Image (tube, rainbow, N blue to C red):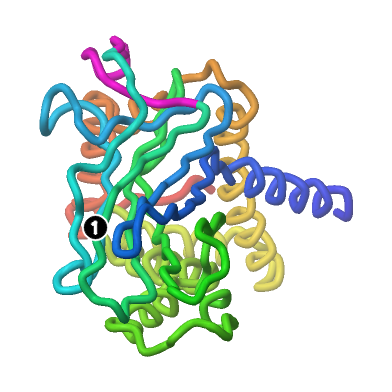
Amino acid sequence: MKIFLKAFILLIGFSLNAQILDPIDWSHQINKVSDDEFELVFIADMDEGWHIYSQYPEIEDDGPIATEIIFMDATGNYSLIGKTTEPPTEPVYEEAFDMEVKYFGGKAEFKQRIKILNPDLALIKAEVNWQICDDKRCLAPDMEEIAFNLNPDAKAAEVEGSVTLDDIKKSSALDLKVTGWENFEQEEVSKKSNFTIFLLGFLGGLIALLTPCVFPMIPLTVSFFTKSGANSQQGLANSIMYGVFIFLIYVLLSLPFHLIDSLDPEILNNISTNVTLNIIFFLVFLIFAFSFFGYYELTLPS
């Protein structure tokens, strides 16, 4: 039993670590052009083999999700000078989307000139949205908020690295009377913790018990374990073991996709959405449904 528990914990830890994938890091810097003009630089540093897509796709509303930079609270505070520039690149055919796309790998810099309209402005916030892919897969679209420090009392004309909320609060030279600061702090606090995400997923699983394809199976499953055990303790132990092995099946099914890059991650999805397989399950559930309505009785083998 101890060996089983150790193996079980090892599999869980390995699976969770394998799912953590973050092939891109964002940083930034700010260059002072004149007293009221600055150049904001967004720097994407990607792992080898990964790439993000151009802000200006060849075909609109088709293909991969383009990189997008959204500047916040610009009205009355600053104005954009021209479009956001990006590294030069040529369209390349990408088989996954069956079209020509423009993308950047390695290190890419996006630059935007701005003109300050509010002399008291100390902070510029921007939101970067992107989708990152390699030659086999694409990760879910992601975003990151970046804050540029425009403090006129700063000693350096160029500030590099990310400015976090803690950095801003600790800065003795920063004037905290910034328009929209309350909203910025609220956005930071609103980020959900891992426990909150777990709790929401757990509650979603409980709600799923009420779905038509799950709820009818509950009395059947409970009846099986209460009648199969010699006593209530044995029935409880069997039911726990049953649940643990269901969990292990899902973990083991996911492991090959973390260990072997050549495997198509859509295999299990294609199986689960197969028309023939779903029709078979539909008929099986119909049989159970008519049994519960009393048309006939299904009994377990003795």
Residue in view at x 40 percent, y 71 percent:
203
Q: Which residues are magenta?
A: 92-105
Q: Is residue 266 above or below residue 301?
A: above
Q: Secondary structure at mark 1?
A: loop
- Horizontal side of residue 34 vs 91, given as left or right: right
Tell me if mark 1 has few (under 14), some (14-19) or many (20+) residues whose alpha carbon lies within 10 angstroms of its own: few
Give the main secondary structure, helix, strand or loop, of the magenta stretch. Answer: strand
Q: Quarter of the image containing the N terminus? A: bottom right
Report x, y in % for residue 21.
Answer: 56, 42
Residue in view at x 32 percent, y 30 percent:
53
Residue 66 can be seen in this image = yes
Residue in view at x 63 percent, y 54 percent:
244
Report x, y in % for residue 42.
Answer: 42, 47
Which residue is under mark 1?
212
Q: Quadrant of residue 155?
A: bottom right
Residue in view at x 62 percent, y 37 percent:
252
